[in-house]
């Protein structure tokens, strides 16, 4: 790596400009390689990455710079304390931080302009265990404070030091990270740090498993039941549920029902007979008792189980000539709905239950009228009908 530095000397009353002038240090070979290579660059709002979205907010004295080792863009504490907070929509596995400026000043034997950078991870103070590596911009390495923050080392009375560090790696699951520059500038002399931040994606470990089941063809009153998904992997904070959906090309956008158990009942208010639906298992972060469908690591079982709730079969009767004499026979036309073959059991006033099979959607049965039949209407009643999928009684 090479860089160009502009060296300037300042009288004491201009020391408040020192931290801002770090923006004059530029790299000529780009950013160095990072253990965590996803670099956050927006000043505020949300930046999208493949594994998470990062929302950046700030408080207090902050600004944005191009600085020596890391090209910024964050500057905290030009003349007062300030902070940046980074919120990750999906937790990340860790961050790498670069700081290229820490200021420490002694005036008349008492410290002034002392600053300390501290971190909060997931809402709690995070004591650092090391101060990273020296930066090529300043040959003075930052130090750890007794509490676990970062400070520039003490300097001789009547002088000041500028120091930095880079490749400060923090490996832990992070949902929120707040970086604060706590500035105690008793004499009005400014401090400030320039900072770059990178993060590592959290490996996706939740696994929904597979559902070993053939397609289901059911009647509307039958419950679609499949074996539990297995094997599944559910890290802490994740859960497993089952979904019924209608479009394999838009699984999450076509969810009809969600269940904690691998079974679904037909609901005519949101479902249609004869439509193919699909059952799958999902595993992801728990949110208010359900799997968070926006979880970037959401896992869906690889093969969904097709299920159809078929309409019940029907039969209708008709004759060409409704007038039939005693001792004569009449052909009764049958028309079926459903999936053949059909099995029909019917009765007439002249005979008990009769069962016949039909391989098409139409058929004929012959009814003969006894000589002693009483004049009047002839009732043919279906008492049982089944097709390939359902039985009606």
Image: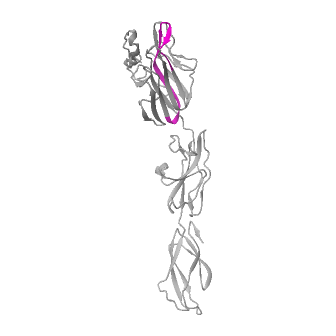
Identity of the residue drawn at 54% across and 83% down: 366
- Look at the image and say whether residue 336 sits in the magenta stretch: no
Q: In the displayed structure, would residue 320 be above or below residue 231?
A: below
Residue segment shown in magenta? 88-116
Q: Is residue 380 above or below residue 255?
A: below
Q: Is residue 39 visible?
A: no
The residue nearer to you, when weighing 123 against 242, is 123
Q: Quadrant of the N terminus?
A: top left
Q: As rendered, which of 274 and 172 lies closer to the eye?
A: 172
Near-viewer residue (39 or 276): 39
- Picture coordinates of residue 183, whole percent (x, y): 48, 19
* Observer-nearest of 214 and 312: 312
Q: Is residue 23 above or below residue 173?
A: above
Residue 7 lies in what quarter of the image? top left
Q: Residue at x 50, y 73 (%)?
A: 361
In magenta segment, residue 94: yes
């Amino acid at each position: 790596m090479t860089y160009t530095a502009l060296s300037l000397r300042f009288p004491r009353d201009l020391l408040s400009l020192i931290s801002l002038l770090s923006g004059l240090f530029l790299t000529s070979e780009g950013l160095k390689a990072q253990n965590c290579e996803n670099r956050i660059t927006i000043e505020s709002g949300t930046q999208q990455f493949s594994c998470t979205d990062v929302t950046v907010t700030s408080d207090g004295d902050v600004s944005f710079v191009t600085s020596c080792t890391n090209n910024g863009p964050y500057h905290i504490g030009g003349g007062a304390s300030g902070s940046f907070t980074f919120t990750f929509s999906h937790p990340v596995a860790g961050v790498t931080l670069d700081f290229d400026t820490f200021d420490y000043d002694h005036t008349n034997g008492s410290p002034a302009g002392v600053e300390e950078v501290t971190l909060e991870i997931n809402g709690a103070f995070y004591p650092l265990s090391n101060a990273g590596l020296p930066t090529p911009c300043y040959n003075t390495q930052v130090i750890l404070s007794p509490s676990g923050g970062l400070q520039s080392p003490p300097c001789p009375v009547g002088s000041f030091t500028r120091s930095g560090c880079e490749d400060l790696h923090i490996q832990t699951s992070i949902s929120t990270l707040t970086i604060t520059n706590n500035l105690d500038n008793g004499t009005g002399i400014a401090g400030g740090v320039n900072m770059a931040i990178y993060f590592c994606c959290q490996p996706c470990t939740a696994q929904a498993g597979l559902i070993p089941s053939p397609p289901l063809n059911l009647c509307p009153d039958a419950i679609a039941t499949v074996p539990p998904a297995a094997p599944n992997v559910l890290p802490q904070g994740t859960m497993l549920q089952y979904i019924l959906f209608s479009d394999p090309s838009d699984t999450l956008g076509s969810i009809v029902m969600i269940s904690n158990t691998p079974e679904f009942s037909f609901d005519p208010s949101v479902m249609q007979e004869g439509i193919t639906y699909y059952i799958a298992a999902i595993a992801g972060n728990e949110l208010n008792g359900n799997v968070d469908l926006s979880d970037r690591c959401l896992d869906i079982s690889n093969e969904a189980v097709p299920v159809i709730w078929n309409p019940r079969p029907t039969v209708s009767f008709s004759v060409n000539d409704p007038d039939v004499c005693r001792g004569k026979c009449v052909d009764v036309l049958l028309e079926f709905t459903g999936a053949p073959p059909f099995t029909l059991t019917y009765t007439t006033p002249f005979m008990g239950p009769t069962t016949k099979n039909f391989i098409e959607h139409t058929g004929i049965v012959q009814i003969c009228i006894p000589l002693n039949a009483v004049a009047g209407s002839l009732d043919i009643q279906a008492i049982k009908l089944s097709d390939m999928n359902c039985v009606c009684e």
